[in-house]
Image (spheres, rainbow, N blue to C red):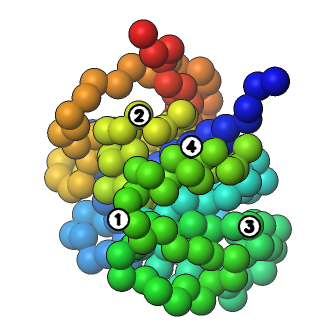
Amino acid sequence: MECLVGRIVVTENISLDGVIRDPAGDEGFERGGWVGAIRDRPELARQALDEARQADAMLLGRRTYEWFAARWPTRIGELADRLNTMPKVVVSATLTSPEWQNTSVLSGDVIEDVTRLKARTPGEIEVPGSGRLVRLLMEHDLVDELRLKVFPIALGAGEHLFGETCTSLGWRLADVRVLDGETAFLTYQRAPRD
């Protein structure tokens, strides 16, 4: 009998030149806010809801968790209901008492803890944002799928999704769509390991 293991699915907003920093404009980055209001982009909003419906849990770095937790608990609607009720796991050495419902904290060895999380979660574990965490997970070959929403803007500076890593990872393009007439939605799956 085959053992089901969770799949880590990274979802990122990314510029044409690979920048992931401050898409909403809340972090004080001088070039931040490049995504615009998703509520004004119906296909992007629908995609966010579809991803939340597919996910069995969310895995977040502390800063991304704090950004979500400051906004979603007071919102209403189907996406808010899903995000507020689904299990959330935060990687943090400093967060001890998360207030957003259904949140637990991983504060030990990140790789060991995430490997255990994958073993006990049979479905999708969505990782939105969380650039540093994503790079660490990729370095240790724990990411199974990338869902990149590529916005038609080049920023020229900022934190990139793919920093220097100690390994080369191969990806296979699984799907391409255009959202709201201008945003490329690219799905990549891990290429078979040799």
In the picture, which quadrant includes the C terminus? top left
**Is disc 4 placed on a helix, strand or loop?**
strand
Measured Cα–Cα span from mark 1 to mark 2 = 26 Å
Identified by mark 3, the residue type is Met
Identified at 73% across, 54% down, the residue is: 56
The residue wearing badge 4 is 8
The residue wearing badge 3 is 86
58 displayed left or right of 132: right
Identified at 21% across, 69% down, the residue is: 30
**Does label 1 or label 4 sit earlier along the sequence?**
4
Identified by mark 2, the residue type is Asp
Instruction: Verify CB contact (< 8 Å) between mark 2 and mark 4.
Output: no
Instruction: Verify CB contact (< 8 Å) between mark 3 and mark 4.
Output: no
Could you tell me how many numbered marks the image carries? 4
**Does label 1 or label 2 sit earlier along the sequence?**
1
**Does label 1 or label 3 sit earlier along the sequence?**
1
Looking at the image, the residue that sits furthest to the top is 194
Q: Which mark is residue 22?
A: 1
Identified by mark 4, the residue type is Ile
Residue 98 versus residue 136 in the image, above or below: below
**Does label 3 or label 2 sit earlier along the sequence?**
3
| Nearer mark to the viewer, of 1 and 2 | 2
Q: Within 10 Å of the Cα at label 3, are there few (<14), some (14-19), or many (20+) other Cα atoms?
A: some
| Nearer mark to the viewer, of 1 and 3 | 3
**Is disc 3 placed on a helix, strand or loop?**
loop
Identified by mark 1, the residue type is Asp
Instruction: Verify CB contact (< 8 Å) between mark 3 and mark 2.
Output: no
Q: Which mark is residue 141?
A: 2
